Image (cartoon, rainbow, N blue to C red):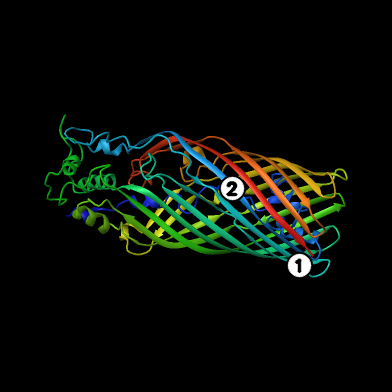
Amino acid sequence: MSHRSRLTLTALTLVAAAAFAPQAQASGFQLREQSPLSQGNAFAGVSAGGGDISSLFFNPAVMTQYEGWQFSFGGTYVGLSAKFEGGTATRTATLQGLGFQVAPVTLTNLNTISGASSHPNAAISAVLPEFNIMYSVNRDLKVGLSLNVPFGLTTEYDSNWIGRYHALKSDLKTIDIAPSLAYRATDQVSIGVAVIVRKADAELSNAVDYGTALALKVGAGLAAAGLSTVSPGPGQNSPVATIAMGAPNATFGTPGFATPGAWDGQAGLKGSGWGVGFKVGMVIQPNKDLRIGLAYQDKMSMTLKGDASFSYPANLPPTDLGALTGAGLKNGKGQADLELPSTFSLGFDWQATPTFALQGEVARTTWSRFQTLRVKFTDNVAPQTTESVTDENWRDTTFMSLGGTWKVSQAWVFRAGVAFDKSAVADAYRTPRIPDNDRKWVSFGTSYTFSKKVTVDVGYSRLIISDGKVMLKSGTAASDPNITRGNLDGTIKAAINILGASLRYSF
């Protein structure tokens, strides 16, 4: 039997793990930066409204607080730094069990993956736009429309860095279009609802150690044929190592293809898709000085469809290239089901004095929905490799913030706030694609009113992120997604600076 027909490569999992899921500025890969005004007090009380109509992203019921036409447009610059330090990377220990540690295999540092132990900032900064418009049909009925970017970030690593088998480029872009409706049921209670139409585009790439993938499959093929995969004696090569070194072998055809670390290429996925969801909210105002807001954004399931691509070193022998493409590692179509979480939020806005208001916010996000990522390869792929499943094992998160607003004159308003945001990613599952960890917010902001119609808002936040440990381990089972990527350990040091500005206009 030829080695081609015996290959059932798991290398496809190298382009599946964490696909369509780069890290962002809230827990998991969620973006909270949807209102430069609310940025100033760390989004405290945003579910209760009271600032401007940009808070309708969080709770559509807040629109009943405004009259006439309301318009806001702005952008938020997100400056993210994510540096990888103190890295070590090794290939799976299964290779030693196959006899690759025995001379005269002329491989240098077979166990150690080459590359710099640190990497400079891999994150790409971006500007997030936001647009909101509202019209009062009458005192009690309001209609609105918002455009926002709720998820997304880009990270990109050098092609020869030590963790290249786990991540090169990760890019996610989304946009929400949300028509909204709010109704004042009583003087104390308003309700709102919005329909969300979401577009997502994603790109993912990483390096692939084709040599290791093939060596592992040679060992599996030898075992299936009833042949030994271990060294026959001290100082002697195993059958797997012998094949890798070029000795003839009638069972597996042309030798010389299974050399770990010798044949590096790249693999990637690009996909896009649409999703539809909703959010509902309520604002309760028991007296003129206190508002309480409750809001719920429903979970959303999206199917992203696109292309899987594979590239190989130019000097890869034709027989070996044929073995890889014959096993399904060739350009084709793929799709991934992305499970996005629901979020429940509760906020208050209390006008403590005529010039000072205190706000608070708590939000719970069900990231535990993101337990696995399943990528299906729908054509041009061998039957054995039509699906790849990667464990994510994320957990639900809680965001908490407290802030204040000071009106110092008819024209000037100042804000400040602090917040804490829990990470959705446990240390054992953190990857370079998702350098997420617990973060603390410190925020400041101001508004200046030029006239009854025009106001400008500015908000700034510094996010202090705990160092994130990367502890990715390669198992021994062929189904393990890291078996061809190897082990990767290190620390991600991240920080975020956020600056937003918006223009409000009413008439």
Find residue 29 and report its horizontal and vertical position in percent. 55, 49
Residue 353 in which image quadrant = top right
Label number found at residue 78: 2
Residue drawn where x is 68% and y is 57% of the image: 57
Nearer the camera: disc 2 or disc 1: 2
Residue 111 placement: quadrant: top left
Q: Which mark is residue 235?
A: none
Mark 1 residue crowding within 10 angstroms, few (<14) / some (14–19) / many (20+) = many
Element class at badge 1: strand
The amino acid marked with disc number 2 is Val
Q: From this viewpoint, is residue 222 visible?
A: yes
Find numbered disc 2 in the image and state the secondary structure of the residue it sits on: strand
Query: Who's the residue at 86% across and 60% down the image?
Result: 187
Number of on-image labels: 2
Compare residues 153 and 111 and report the one nearer the observer. 153
Q: Position of residue 3 (x, y in %)?
A: 20, 52
Q: Quadrant of the N terminus?
A: bottom left
Q: Which residue lies most toward the bottom here?
A: 137
Give the Cα separation between the discs numbered 2 and 1: 30 Å
Considering every residue shown, the one lying at the far front of the view is 450
Mark carried by residue 135 = 1
Question: Is residue 5 visible to the viewer in this orientation of the structure?
Answer: no
**Residue type, label 1:** Tyr
Quadrant the C terminus occupies: bottom right
Q: Position of residue 498 (x, y in %)?
A: 62, 45
Q: Can you give x and y, in whole percent of width and height, for residue 416 in the image?
A: 73, 41
Other residues around mark 2 within 10 Å, as few (<14) / some (14–19) / many (≥20): many
